Amino acid sequence: MKFYTIIVMILFTCIGTASYAQNSVFQISDGKKDFELRAVAELGFLGVLSHKVQFGENGTYFDYKKSGGQNVLFPVGRVSLELDIKERNTVILLYQPLTIQTQALLTEDVVVNDLTFPANSSVDLLYNFPFYRVSYLRELLPDQERWGLAVGGSVQLRNATITFESTDGERFRTNQDVGVVPALKVRSRYDLSKLLYLELEADGIYAPISYLNGSDNEVKGAILDASIRSGLKVTQDVNAFLNLRYLGGGAEGASDDEPGPGDGYVKNWLNFITVSTGFVYKFN
């Protein structure tokens, strides 16, 4: 219930903020709005295609789907605000909570940052990887009635906490990290009719992180958040949609400021798919 409560609270906050902006900021110029604000919310489920993590050069490359209980479906949701500025520019603020908690009985020894969790023992596993994203898009086809194509970039802030804890409380390891990740962004839309539309959207990058943050260590990382959406225009101000999303990426390398235990080496790669429904509310 806490997960859904957070989503609902954020959504109401977005709507309240948007309503204030509508009444106090929006201006009409030549019969057209200089600004248009939309609130977007979706809820659904997440399935794990593959997910593996390793902490420490001598650590176990742990398979969450095979050995960590991630072979079932998990709730997922996201909320965002989108502000169109003079028709061709769009700024997007997005929050994506992502928490997966499981419990598993280990079939073999698992080493996490120099600590061994023995076979035939049970562990509580937390993979908490919410992120915040700010994006900008520039429309390339402003005069097209049915087609839309926009390109731009995103800056994503991750806030990760990954833990392994024995159910008897005697063994515990955690890895926490806050980091900034830039990405390229593209969005395309096609109106099938006056009521139906298709939309494609992707944020992604693959790069040596050391070049981006100035580190001497060879760290590589990648993200890809890509979706296809089928939408229905319910009213002039409300759209409903069904969304299929691929969410993947990860990082591999050693941190130069890891306090320990362990040597700072981390390898974390994931491939998720989500199915969700949601709505878009446009403030006029």
Image (cartoon, rainbow, N blue to C red):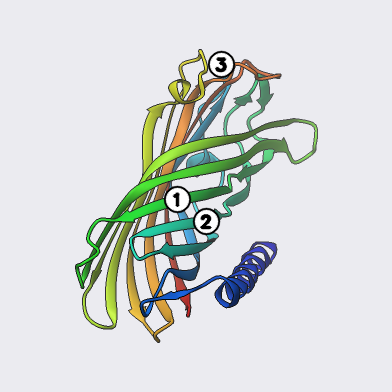
Q: Residue at x 53, y 60 (%)?
A: 76
Q: Residue at x 63, y 67 (%)?
A: 4
Closer mark to the observer between disc 2 and disc 3: 2
State the image coordinates of residue 67 (x, y, percent, origin top left).
53, 40
| Residues under numbered marks 3 and 1 in contact, where contact means CB atoms less than 8 Å apart | no
Mark 2, residue position: 94
For the N terminus, the image quarter is: bottom right
Q: Using the image as rendered, state which of residue 28 and residue 215 is in the foreground.
A: 28
Mark 1, residue position: 135
Structural distance between the alpha carbons of marks 2 and 3: 37 Å
Direction front: furthest residue: 30
Residue 14's place in the image compared with 265, above or below, is below
Tell me if mark 1 has few (under 14), some (14-19) or many (20+) residues whose alpha carbon lies within 10 angstroms of its own: many
The numbered mark, 3 or 1, whose residue comes first in the sequence reads 3
Mark 3, residue position: 58
The numbered mark, 2 or 3, whose residue comes first in the sequence reads 3
